Each structure stands twice: as C-alpha cells, then as structure tokens.
C-alpha cells in the first residue's frame, strides 16, 4: 500500500479558522504549508509555529503567485505528494444587494469561488491528479458556511458565493473520484473570527430604508460572534474531519444546531421569510 503524506496546505492562515486549523495540524505532527498575503504575517507565523510550518506568499486571486507557490511546493516535496488541501481563504462584506457596489459583490466570487478553484487546479497534481502519484491520493476540504445553504439578508453576496462553492464542490467530488481524491464540504456557523467584524459596515446605508433592519442585523452578528465556537475548536474539528477514514460529503459545525441549522432548513421558505421579516423589521 502506498504511504500517506503527512503534509497539508491551508489557505488563509494569518487569522481565524485557517490559523486555528494550522495550529491543530501542527499539534498532530503534520508539516503545514499556509498561504498568507504579506511578508509580515509570514514572518510572524514562521516564528510562532516553527520549522514544521512553511508560509507560502500568495493571494488566491493572483494566478501567477498561486502557480509560483505550487511550483515552490513541488520543489520542496521533491517528487512526493501533498496530503491535503484546506481551502479556507474567504471574504465577507455585508450590505443590501440593492445598493452594495458590484465590485464588492464581484470580489466575493473572485476570492470565495474562483480563487478557491484556481488554488485547487494549481495543487491538484500534487494531491494525486496525475499518473504515477507516489503516495495515497490526498483530500480537499472546502470551508463553506451555514450560509452555503441558508440565505440571510444583508449578506447576499457572501451567501451567493458560498452556495456556488458548495455546488462546485459536489461536481469536483464526483470528477476527482477517478483519481481517488476525496472532496469534503465543511460548513461552520458562528465562529469567533475577525471576518465578520472587518466586513460589516452599515454606515454607507444610513439613508436607506434598510438601515433600521441592518442595525438589528449587526446586533445579531455581535451576539452570534460572542457565542460562537472558538477558532481552536473549529481547527480541531477540521483536523478530525480530515483524518476520518470515510468522511461524509458535508459537515455542519454550529453552536446551536436546532435553531441555526435544522429548523431554518425544515421550515417552508415563506414562513422563514415572515419570521426574519418580523424579527428584523424588513416585513412591510
């Protein structure tokens, strides 16, 4: 039987879920490669994580930088294979779709969907999408969100990109079965991560009819974030899922499974519309 590679690449490790996942894999003895977008973060993480960690400097939307990183990693692995890829890098910016600038909406898809696919394509040969791969085929974990299946107001661009990520992941899983590469979707709910604090600014919409509802929404984001899972917990769960011999197609990681996942998916769409409308003030 071919050996299993104890190497893994995680995108977006400077903060949040990617940072937590990197720590968890390092604790388990993996050699971790992590993407960051600037040298300051690269140096900080290298000093913190030590020799088992190697930063790769690239933005997932930069095709040349992504390919250069793939070439760099191939040289580092010296003909061996990459055990896994955790596609974690992502962005989230709140705003009503009526007014949110198209360049902001487009950026969600550039990072969360096309950037993810660009990274996946570049590293697939190292994961086993080639003849004569020297180790067992690797696996891919695509970090989605509860919002990959449940749509909430004022995060439409993010929701759309995560819906797209999940559809892409299902097709990719079925295609890569020919190589034995597994593709798994991980959908976290509320997590104590900077992505929300950095991405929700309601001030541009102060003179719109959405503003009172957005104030309510911002309070809900703060409450959810305060009660969310820690990045360390999510990092451990990601590592657990990665090491599962026969993983499920999708994993949902939410603090309140009933209210945040089960009920919203069981309720008729119109009833959920009414509930959210009454709670937020969006219902006319």
Image (tube, helix red, strand yellow):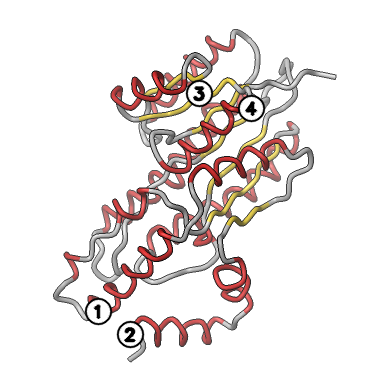
The quadrant of the picture occupied by the N terminus is top right
Other residues around mark 1 within 10 Å, as few (<14) / some (14–19) / many (≥20): some
Q: CA distance from mark 3 to mark 1?
A: 44 Å
Distance between mark 3 and mark 2 Cα atoms: 46 Å
Please state which of residues 118 and 197 is positioned toward the viewer in this rendering. 197
Question: Which element type, helix, strand or loop, lies under badge 3?
Answer: strand
Residue 126, above or below 241:
above
Whether residue 107 sits left or right of residue 266 in the image: it is left
Left or right: 130 as drawn, with respect to 20: right
Q: For residue 32, what is the image quadrant?
A: top right
- Asked which secondary structure carries label 1, the reply is helix
161 or 92: nearer the viewer: 92
Sequence-wise first label, 4 or 1 = 4
Q: Which residue is mark 4?
A: 28
Where residue 186 sits: x, y (%)? Answer: 59, 49
Q: Are marks 2 and 1 in contact (CB under 8 Å)?
A: yes
Q: Which residue is mark 1?
A: 212
> Split into 4 quadrants, where in the image is the C terminus?
bottom left
Q: CA distance from mark 3 to mark 4?
A: 14 Å
Q: Earlier in the sequence, mark 3 or mark 2?
A: 3
């Amino acid at each position: 039987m071919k050996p299993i590679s104890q190497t893994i690449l995680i995108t977006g490790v400077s903060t949040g879920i990617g940072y937590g996942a990197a720590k968890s894999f390092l604790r388990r003895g993996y050699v971790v490669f992590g993407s960051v977008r600037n040298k300051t973060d690269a140096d900080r993480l290298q000093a913190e994580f030590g020799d088992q960690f190697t930063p790769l400097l690239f933005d997932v939307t930069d095709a040349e930088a992504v390919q250069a990183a793939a070439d760099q990693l191939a040289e580092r692995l010296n003909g061996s294979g990459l055990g896994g890829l955790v596609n974690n890098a992502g962005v989230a910016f709140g705003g009503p779709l009526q007014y949110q600038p198209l360049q902001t909406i487009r950026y969600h898809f550039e990072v969360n969907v096309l950037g993810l696919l660009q990274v996946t394509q570049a590293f697939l040969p190292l994961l086993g999408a080639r003849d004569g791969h020297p180790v067992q085929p690797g696996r891919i974990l695509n970090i989605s969100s509860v919002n990959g299946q449940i749509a909430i107001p004022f995060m439409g661009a993010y929701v759309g990109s995560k819906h797209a990520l999940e559809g892409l992941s299902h097709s990719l899983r079925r295609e890569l079965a020919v190589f034995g590469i597994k593709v798994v979707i991980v959908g976290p709910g509320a997590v104590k991560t900077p992505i929300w604090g950095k991405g929700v600014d309601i001030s541009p919409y102060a003179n719109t009819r959405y503003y009172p509802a957005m104030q309510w929404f911002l309070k809900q984001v703060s409450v959810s974030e305060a009660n969310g899972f820690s990045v360390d917990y999510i990092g451990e769960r990601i590592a657990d899922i990665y090491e599962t011999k026969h993983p499920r197609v999708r994993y949902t990681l939410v603090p309140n499974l009933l209210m945040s996942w089960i009920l919203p998916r069981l309720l008729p769409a119109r009833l959920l519309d009414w509930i959210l409308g009454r709670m937020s003030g969006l219902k006319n």
